[in-house]
Image: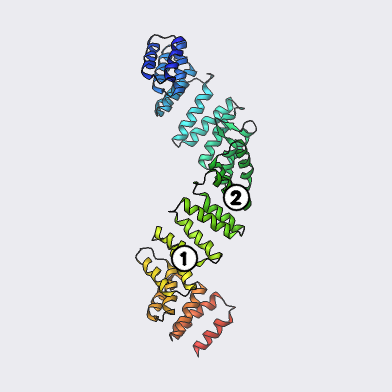
């Protein structure tokens, strides 16, 4: 074994060329023990091809040795030779002690190829042989989770958690939490996130914990966890928008607005931060800042119709009708037409006493809002002002059908018919 130890020392000192000379010597003239031990060591060090050569040489003497076949298959897998790995694994006999391990590897290979039923069959067969082996339950959980079979996945993970919290370096509580969350069981997921974070604080898990708490309606928990994440990694861009939403739900609008401003400092090209910040700014009475944020959002994406609509709503409130038309005309350059902008443009033209233009916009918007009482009311009163009594009567008759208990519409129709 001196040669093996010498080669490992050379590898650790990055003397690869000298080390490979010894590998070739052992491959050709070494003992079976030397080849086996060196093969395992080389595999661990990432010299997969060289390890494979040693295992293949050993199999010339021990062609039915299951442990060697499994090691050779693992080499093929690491080298991206999945078909060769399958052929090797299928050589194992059912009575071989390594047969369950071969089933696990085959299941993994078939899962990678999307052959989920075949993968499940391999795992269930391994489960019959080793009913208490938690690694099989974990593999089943992973398979079911990938398929979106969340109930089956949680049952498999529960069996694992009865014995282990960590499998192959994977936090099983985290996996359970993620499956429950994706499956919509947000509240049930939270205790598992707690346990996962007790084992190890990891920023992606912390974000998922906070986001799940937000979805479950635990806003204070979400705020606490998002802020904890912010302290650990302020460049984790996704947290700021959700933190702002959590603050808004708790009616802490100023805190939410500040969270958005911090987010913009970290992610200045995120249009969603700007528009959400604008909405919060409106709620706390900061109209100038809201306008600026909406304009920034629209500058980042000139086709962002939501930002355009927020601006026109604000300008209508402020009676800045020319500014409304500036936005609506700018959006006309794009193929996607936003119906609300037609309505807003109609109101702006009406207020500016450009009545023919207003009528055109109302007519265009009518296609989209013919069952929207607020629009029909605006349109109907405009038609009355323009002296178009018959057209107005048609609109108010529609309104009566939509709101039969509104006496005002009844009176208007009666007056128009006189």
Horizontal side of 21 relative to 200 (left or right) equals left
73 is higher (above) or lower (below) than 357: above
Q: Secondary structure at mark 2?
A: helix
Instruction: Estimate the x, y position of residue 300 in percent, counting from the top left.
Output: 40, 57
Which residue in the structure is indicated by mark 2? 222
Picture residue at 47% right of the left edge, 52% below the top = 265
| Res 182 seen here | no
112 is higher (above) or lower (below) than 24: below
82 is higher (above) or lower (below) than 391: above
Distance from the alpha carbon under mark 2 to that under mark 1: 29 Å
Viewer-proximal residue, 90 or 105? 105
374 is higher (above) or lower (below) than 246: below
Characterize the local packing of mark 2: few (<14), some (14-19) or many (20 or more) Cα atoms within 10 angstroms. Answer: many
Specify the farthest residue to the bottom: 418
Picture residue at 39% right of the left edge, 70% below the top = 326
Characterize the local packing of mark 1: few (<14), some (14-19) or many (20 or more) Cα atoms within 10 angstroms. Answer: many
Instruction: Estimate the x, y position of residue 151 in percent, counting from the top left.
Output: 59, 42
Q: Earlier in the sequence, mark 2 or mark 1?
A: 2
Instruction: Estimate the x, y position of residue 165 in percent, counting from the top left.
Output: 61, 33
Q: Quadrant of residue 337?
A: bottom left
Instruction: Estimate the x, y position of residue 314 in percent, counting from the top left.
Output: 48, 69
Q: Which mark is residue 291?
A: 1
| Res 119 seen here | yes
Picture residue at 51% right of the left edge, 41% below the top = 147
Image depth: mark 2 or mark 1 in front:
1
Q: Secondary structure at mark 1?
A: helix
Viewer-proximal residue, 176 or 264? 264
């Amino acid at each position: 074994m001196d040669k093996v130890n010498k080669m490992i020392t050379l590898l650790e000192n990055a003397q690869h060329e000298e080390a490979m000379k010894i590998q070739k010597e052992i491959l050709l003239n070494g003992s079976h023990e030397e080849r086996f031990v060196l093969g395992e060591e080389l595999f661990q060090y990432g010299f997969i091809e060289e390890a494979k050569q040693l295992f293949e040489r050993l199999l010339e003497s021990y062609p039915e040795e299951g442990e060697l076949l499994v090691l050779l298959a693992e080499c093929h897998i690491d080298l991206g030779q999945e078909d060769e790995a399958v052929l090797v694994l299928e050589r194992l006999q059912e009575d071989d002690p390594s047969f369950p391990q071969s089933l696990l590897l085959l299941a993994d290979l078939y899962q990678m190829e999307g052959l989920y039923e075949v993968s499940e069959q391999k795992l269930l067969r391994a489960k019959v042989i080793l009913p208490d082996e938690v690694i099989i339950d974990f593999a089943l959980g992973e398979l079911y989770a990938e398929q979106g079979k969340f109930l089956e996945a949680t049952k498999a993970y529960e069996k694992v958690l009865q014995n282990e919290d960590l499998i192959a370096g994977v936090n099983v509580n985290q996996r359970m939490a993620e499956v429950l969350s994706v499956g919509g069981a947000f509240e049930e997921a939270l205790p598992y996130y707690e346990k996962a974070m007790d084992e190890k604080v990891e920023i992606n898990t912390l974000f998922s914990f906070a986001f799940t708490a937000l979805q479950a309606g635990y806003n204070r928990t979400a705020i606490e966890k998002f802020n904890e994440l912010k302290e650990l990694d302020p460049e984790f861009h996704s947290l700021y928008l959700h933190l702002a939403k959590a603050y808004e739900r708790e009616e802490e609008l100023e805190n939410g607005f500040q969270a958005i401003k911090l987010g913009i400092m970290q992610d200045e090209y995120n249009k969603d931060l700007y528009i959400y910040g604008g909405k919060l700014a409106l709620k706390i009475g900061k109209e100038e800042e809201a306008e600026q944020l909406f304009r920034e959002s629209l500058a980042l994406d000139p086709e962002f119709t939501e930002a355009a609509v927020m601006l026109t709503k604000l300008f209508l409130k402020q009676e800045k009708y020319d500014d409304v038309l500036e936005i609506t005309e700018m959006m006309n350059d794009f193929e996607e037409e936003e119906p609300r902008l037609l309505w807003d443009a109609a109101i702006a033209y009406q207020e500016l006493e450009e009545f023919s233009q207003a009528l055109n916009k109302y007519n265009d918007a009518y296609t989209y809002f013919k069952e929207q009482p607020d629009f029909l009311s605006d349109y109907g009163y405009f038609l009355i002002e323009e002296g178009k009594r018959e057209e107005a009567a048609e609109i108010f008759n529609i309104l009566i059908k939509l709101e039969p208990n509104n006496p005002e519409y009844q009176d208007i129709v009666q007056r128009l018919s006189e």
